[in-house]
Image: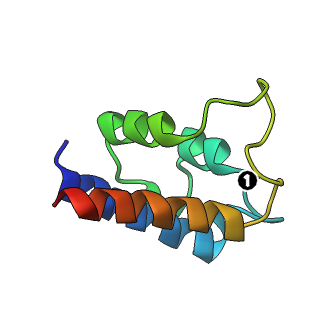
């Protein structure tokens, strides 16, 4: 997967979060959004893209726990923006 494709994918994930994929009417966190891919903005991602998204989620947490407070968008968007910035430095 090319760096530019990863950036586009992360922007798509960020847009899904802003549109409500995480929140009271959506999932509690990134894992849920990526696992279900029910949100209209993310329905067309491939299995490889899904694997990449899971690979960027921090691993230092208990199973069935959240990396950030459940249902809160801001820390997840900051995390995605940081990942996008890191990738942009490679291009």
Crowd rating for badge 1 (residues with CA inside 10 Å; few <14, some 14–19, many 20+): many
> In the figure, 64 relative to 73: above or below?
above
| For residue 51, side relative to residue 48 (left or right) | right
Q: How many marks?
A: 1
Quadrant holding the N terminus: top left
Q: Residue 69, how many percent across, how many down?
A: 83, 54
| Residue depicted at x 50% and y 36% | 54
Coloring basis for residues = rainbow
Q: Under tag 1, what secondary structure?
A: loop
Q: Residue 52, how many percent across, how many down?
A: 38, 38
Q: Residue furthest bottom?
A: 19
Quadrant holding the C terminus: bottom left
Q: Residue 43, how many percent across, how many down?
A: 43, 54
Q: Residue furthest front?
A: 89
| Viewer-proximal residue among 68 and 14 | 68
| Residue depicted at x 76% and y 51% | 68
| Residue depicted at x 35% and y 53% | 44
| For residue 59, side relative to residue 80 (left or right) | right
Q: Looking at the rendering, which quadrant does residue 72 occupy?
A: bottom right
| For residue 4, side relative to residue 20 (left or right) | left
| Residue depicted at x 70% and y 62% | 22
Residue under numbered circle 1:
27
Q: Residue 19, how many percent across, how many down?
A: 60, 75
| Viewer-proximal residue among 24 and 66 | 66
Q: Looking at the rendering, which quadrant does residue 16 occupy?
A: bottom right
């Amino acid at each position: 997967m090319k760096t530019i494709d990863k950036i586009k994918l992360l922007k798509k994930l960020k847009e899904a979060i802003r549109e409500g994929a995480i929140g009271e009417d959506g999932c509690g966190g990134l894992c849920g959004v990526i696992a279900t891919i029910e949100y209209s903005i993310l329905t067309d991602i491939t299995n490889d893209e899904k694997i990449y998204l899971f690979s960027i989620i921090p691993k230092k947490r208990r199973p069935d726990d959240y990396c950030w407070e459940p249902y809160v968008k801001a820390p997840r968007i900051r995390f995605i923006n940081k990942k996008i910035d890191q990738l942009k430095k490679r291009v």
